[in-house]
Amino acid sequence: MTSGSVLRRCFHNPGRVTIISTIRGKRPYYNKSPTTFKSELFCPFCPGNEKYTPPATLALHISTNGKYVFFSEKESGEISTWVVRVFPNKYPALAPKLNINLAYGYHEVLVETRIHNEEKYLKDPRNVYFALKTLKERIKRILEDPKIKHVIVIKNKGVRAGASITHPHLQIFANTFIPPEIGNEIFGFKRFFEENSECPLCYLLSTYRELIYYSNESFASLIAYAPRVPYETYIVPFKHTFSFLNISDNEMYDLSTTLSRTLLTLKKVLGDFDYNLWFHTIYDSSLSFYHWHIEILPLTTTWGGYEKGAGVYIVDKFPENVASELRNAISEEK
């Protein structure tokens, strides 16, 4: 069914319920929240402004012979030739030292590129590859701390998404506990596997191929089966693995291409949209039934009381139709 009204439940997170109702798309809208920043006269994440951020816990430098070298700084700005730069958030929610005012953990910023404009950054997948390579290395180092049980990586793009700086950057949160949403997914993956002898995301990839709008050898971009917003996208590896840290270098480049193509395609269809993005991955091999993935939540609609109070999401477009729209947008580029 691609019209009318239907109820769907997320396969890997069964507590999440969506009502797809095309008639809702006929409602009038009288107000849209602004998505633009006030003009930025200064960006602390741009090259040359390193002294306005804490010293880098990790920075990627590419040497003259093309080798990738990771450094850390004692003082901000020591590594002026950085390609990707990671440093503690100046306003952290977590801190790696015992502090009566902060929970234990790590809260860091990963500046993805020296390029201030996201669209320019995304047009060359190598830029994304460098960011992901640095991210993987930083997560590995953080997990050497035995107190850390989970690391989640997020991105807020735009005012509505909670961003305060436009320069492309990720945030890293390392916790001493498993976050509730990850716990819900672990439960969902485990239950689905026990009932069906199959991973729910593997099942989604093989059974609902009409939801896929971009793919390469290693990854697929698809619209969520039970989306919270009409263009909610998953980026999923075809090879079942529980952790982002398990991917090979070739797979990393495929992921870079997938992520850049996905975001640019969404931008082509939606315009300059705000979004939240996060990596859902675990690091415990005993939970191998889990399938790591990236979720992208374009903020094209505003949740009302029903969504917030009941946890039931109403969308006005069928995922199959949205995926077709995005496939067409990609085919027009060829």
Image: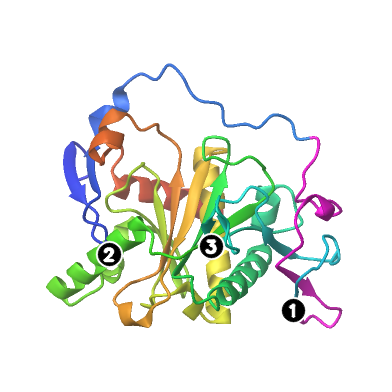
Quarter of the image with the C terminus is: bottom right
The answer to whether 249 is drawn above or below residue 90 in the figure is below
Q: Residue at x 69, y 29 (%)?
A: 38
Q: Label 1 sits on what residue type?
A: Tyr
Q: Position of residue 98 (x, y in %)?
A: 57, 62
Task: Give the Cα distance between marks 3 and 1.
Answer: 28 Å
Question: Is 30 on the left-hand or right-hand side of 116?
Answer: left
Foreground disc of the pair 1, 2: 1
Q: Label 2 sits on what residue type?
A: Leu
- 293 vs 330, nearest the viewer: 293
Q: Which residues are magenta?
A: 41-68
Task: Name the outermost residue toward the left.
Answer: 195
Q: Residue at x 76, y 79 (%)?
A: 69
Q: Earlier in the sequence, mark 1 or mark 2?
A: 1
The answer to whether 4 is drawn above or below residue 56 in the figure is above
User: Mark 3 sits on what residue?
Assistant: 105
Q: Residue at x 30, y 24 (%)?
A: 26
Packing grade of label 3 (10 A; few <14, some 14-19, many >=20) is many
The answer to whether 157 is drawn above or below residue 327 in the figure is above
